[in-house]
Image (tube, coloured by chain):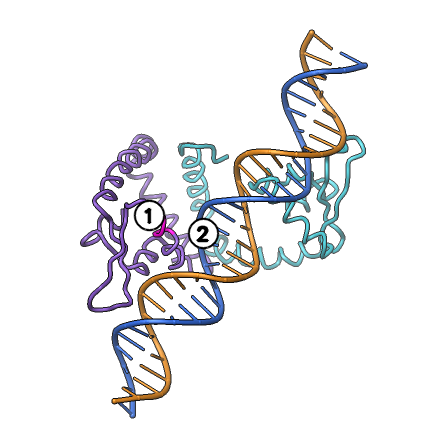
Chain colours: A purple, B cyan, C orange, D blue
Amino acid sequence: MHLEQAPLHRLSRVELAKRMHVSASTVTRMAAPLEKIGVVSRQTDERDARLAFVVLTESGLEKVDEARVTFTKQAGYVFRDRWTEEDLKQLSGLLHRLIADAPGNLT
Amino acid sequence: MHLEQAPLHRLSRVELAKRMHVSASTVTRMAAPLEKIGVVSRQTDERDARLAFVVLTESGLEKVDEARVTFTKQAGYVFRDRWTEEDLKQLSGLLHRLIADAPGNLT
DNA sequence: GCAATGTGCTTGCGTTCGCAAGTAATATGT
DNA sequence: ACATATTACTTGCGAACGCAAGCACATTGC
């Protein structure tokens, strides 16, 4: 979904890593099999040869669309059906406070 | 701490696993090095030869006491100093609701 | 122009974990 | 009583992950 909403449906590996809150190596290792099954592909930047974009292919976009159906259904089942907007605001606020107050760098 | 507050400072491996929310194999593998450094030891039940208790040794009890100092300080730093009783009640309530509402078995 | 520094990425290594299968002991049903 | 099922534990295996090192390229400062 990060890729889907990114311009050109692509992100550099480090940028994707940041958004997924995982290390760069994890992105490298996640991308490989996804590339093999054709849902993403690799692109280089002509300006900066270091960059290796992860790009959603046409097939990948379809997969995301399919997945979103399930995702939305499940998320809706919990949050939309059982939680009010007020509940979610409260939970979100408390969790953000917890992250802010907790020691270490949880960002 | 689970062991510390258990009767005789000991628990069977599966019971400890449940309280720690990890699998039995994890307890087996955690116990081994702790045994090696002498903070826990192994005991058998004379009634049921399948049971293999994890027991806190004297040295283990001391370690727990030491650790609790840090633990209490850190926990206090976040929760006692920055959070009111009311905040904690709210967060706890919301998280329990989330667990209850979420799909799967998060117990 | 070029050395020093920084950035993006990959890979080897070690850690942690759960599952599934195997073993041993106990509980249950007839 | 004894076969079957259940329970407790261990271990092989594979998955996932981060760190540190290494490489290629880019940027900065002189």
Horizontal and vertical percent for residue B90?
42, 42
**Direction from residue A48 to residue A14 in the image, left or right:** right
Query: Is the residue marked by circle 1 packed among few (<14), some (14-19), or many (20+) residues within 10 Å?
Result: few
In percent of width and height, residue A62 lies at 23, 40
Which label sits on residue A17?
none
Chain holding disc 2: B
Query: What distance separates the C-alpha of mark 2 from that of mark 1?
Result: 49 Å
**Local SS, label 1:** helix
Does residue A33 show up magenta in the picture?
yes
Q: Quadrant of residue A18?
A: bottom left
Residue type at the position of mark 1: Lys
**Badge 2 and badge 1 both on one subunit:** no
Q: Is residue A101 above or below residue A74?
A: below
Number of the front mark, 2 or 1:
1
B29 relative to C27, above or below: below
Identified at 32% across, 41% down, the residue is A88
Residue B77 is a magenta residue: no
Q: Is residue A14 left or right of residue C12?
A: left
Tell me if D18 is positioned left or right of B51 in this view.
left
| Residue sitting at x 37%, y 56% | A28
Question: Disc 1 designates what residue?
Answer: A36
Residues rendered magenta in the picture? A30-35
Residue at image point 34% right, 33% down: A78
The total number of labels drawn is: 2
* Type of the residue with mark 2: Trp
Location of mark 2 (residue): B83
